[in-house]
Each structure stands twice: as structure tokens, then as C-alpha cells.
């Protein structure tokens, strides 16, 4: 499970988690720190991967290439002791680069070359594929509707697994939101009917 930490010399927070066997350090914005604190999560505490994903999607948790090896002297050695065992939420929740599986600085890109398709690419892979990229949108800006409109507008029929997995995640979040809304409306209607019967 992700673990919240605070830098040694600064009052700034970051999160360690493991994705595909690699330890990833996510930096937090002040809003991200505030959201975790309001949820009762403080340095040294683990929390659900889905919450980290929400922070990532809102732009409140980011990597942008600042991985574990670049944190250097800003962390204490004891912070390198991890306990990622028995994480109930799959690491497949996180969107990853379609080429190298990095979560760093992801964009949804349209690739135009021998084949025309959509992919999620990190900054390094975008630089390597620069000649083939036609459209590139930061993933934090990508909504379910925007993704569907982009695929339709640009006539993109083929998606690699990184985009398909991300689209499934967006669809699941959309369904969950609608289910919660339907449940809320059903509860209100039942109370209304009971009131009418009592009249």
C-alpha cells in the first residue's frame, strides 16, 4: 500500500508505492497534502491505492521523473523501509506508459505512422516517438468524454492496452458515480412515497 512521508529538510510530503516491482515516489501538491491530512493520513501511515489514484488524476500527486534515485539526501534511511505486502488494491489501477510501463508525466497521444493508434506515453517515450506523434494531451486533463470525442474526431480505431485499461478505469468510475446517484435518488423517492401514503 502507498506510504506517506515528509522530506527531511522541508515541510513537503511525498508518497512511496510499488508498481510492477518498482518503487515509485509521488510528489504531492499542497492540496494533495491537505486532502490526505483531512482523511486522517499522516507521515508513516499507509493508505489505499485508489486514494493515490484520485490524487494522481486530479494532479495533486505527480512523478515527472523524480523517482526514488533522485530524492537523495532529502529522505531518512528509515524511510526506505517499505511494507507493500498484502495491498488489497491492484497496481493495475494506475495508468502506465504503453512502452516502458512508467507512470511519469503521462500523456494520451495519437501515433501516426505505419499504424494509426492511441497510446499513453511518458515524457521519455514521447521524446523517442516525437516524429510519429500527432496529438498529445496530459493525462490529468483527460476525461471520459474527452477521450471518446478525441478517438471519434481523430478517427482513431486502434488503442493499445495502456489506453484500453485507462478507458476501462474511466468507465468504472463513471458507472460508480451513476450507481451512487441512482441509489441516492431511490432513497429520496421511497421517503416521498411513504409520506404520500400517510396523507
Image (spheres, rainbow, N blue to C red):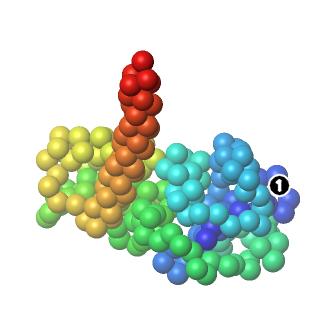
The residue that appears at 43% across and 69% down in the rendered structure is 92
Residue 188 against residue 135 in the figure, above or below: above
Q: Position of residue 129 (x, y in %)?
A: 32, 62
Q: Residues within 10 Å of mark 1 (few under 14, many from 20)?
A: few
Quarter that holds the N terminus: bottom right
Residue to which mark 1 is pinned: 10
Residue nearest the viewer, comparing 199 with 30 = 199
Q: Position of residue 102 (x, y in %)?
A: 46, 68
Q: Position of residue 108 (x, y in %)?
A: 34, 53
Does the rendering let one see residue 157? yes
Judged from this view, the residue extending furthest toward the right is 9
Q: In the picture provided, is 87 more to the left or to the right than 112?
A: right
Number of numbered discs: 1
Quarter that holds the C terminus: top left
The residue that appears at 42% across and 29% down in the rendered structure is 194
SS at mark 1? loop
Residue 179 against residue 106 in the figure, above or below: above
Residue 22 against residue 49 in the figure, above or below: below
The residue that appears at 59% across and 63% down in the rendered structure is 48
Q: In the picture provided, is 23 more to the left or to the right than 188?
A: right
The residue that appears at 39% across and 22% down in the rendered structure is 196
Q: In the picture provided, is 52 more to the left or to the right than 11?
A: left
* Corner quadrant of residue 131: bottom left
Amino acid at each position: 500500500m502507498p506510504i506517506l512521508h515528509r522530506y527531511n529538510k522541508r515541510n513537503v510530503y511525498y508518497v512511496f508505492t510499488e508498481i510492477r516491482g518498482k518503487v515509485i515516489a509521488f510528489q504531492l501538491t499542497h492540496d494533495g497534502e491537505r486532502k490526505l491530512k483531512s482523511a486522517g493520513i499522516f507521515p508513516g501511515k499507509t493508505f489505499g491505492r485508489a486514494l493515490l489514484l484520485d490524487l494522481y488524476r486530479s494532479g495533486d500527486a505527480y512523478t515527472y521523473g523524480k523517482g526514488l534515485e533522485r530524492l537523495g539526501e532529502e529522505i531518512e534511511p528509515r524511510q526506505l523501509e517499505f511494507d507493500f505486502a498484502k495491498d488489497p488494491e491492484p497496481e493495475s489501477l494506475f495508468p502506465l506508459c504503453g512502452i516502458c510501463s512508467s507512470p511519469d508525466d503521462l500523456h494520451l497521444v495519437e501515433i501516426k505512422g505505419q499504424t494509426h493508434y492511441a497510446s499513453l506515453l511518458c515524457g521519455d517515450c514521447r521524446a523517442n516517438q516525437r516524429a510519429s506523434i500527432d496529438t498529445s494531451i496530459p493525462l490529468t486533463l483527460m476525461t471520459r468524454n474527452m477521450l471518446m470525442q478525441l478517438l471519434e474526431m481523430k478517427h482513431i480505431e486502434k488503442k493499445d492496452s495502456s489506453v484500453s485499461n485507462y478507458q476501462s478505469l474511466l468507465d468504472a468510475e463513471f458507472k460508480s458515480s451513476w450507481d451512487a446517484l441512482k441509489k441516492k435518488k431511490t432513497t429520496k423517492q421511497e421517503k416521498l412515497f411513504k409520506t404520500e401514503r400517510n396523507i
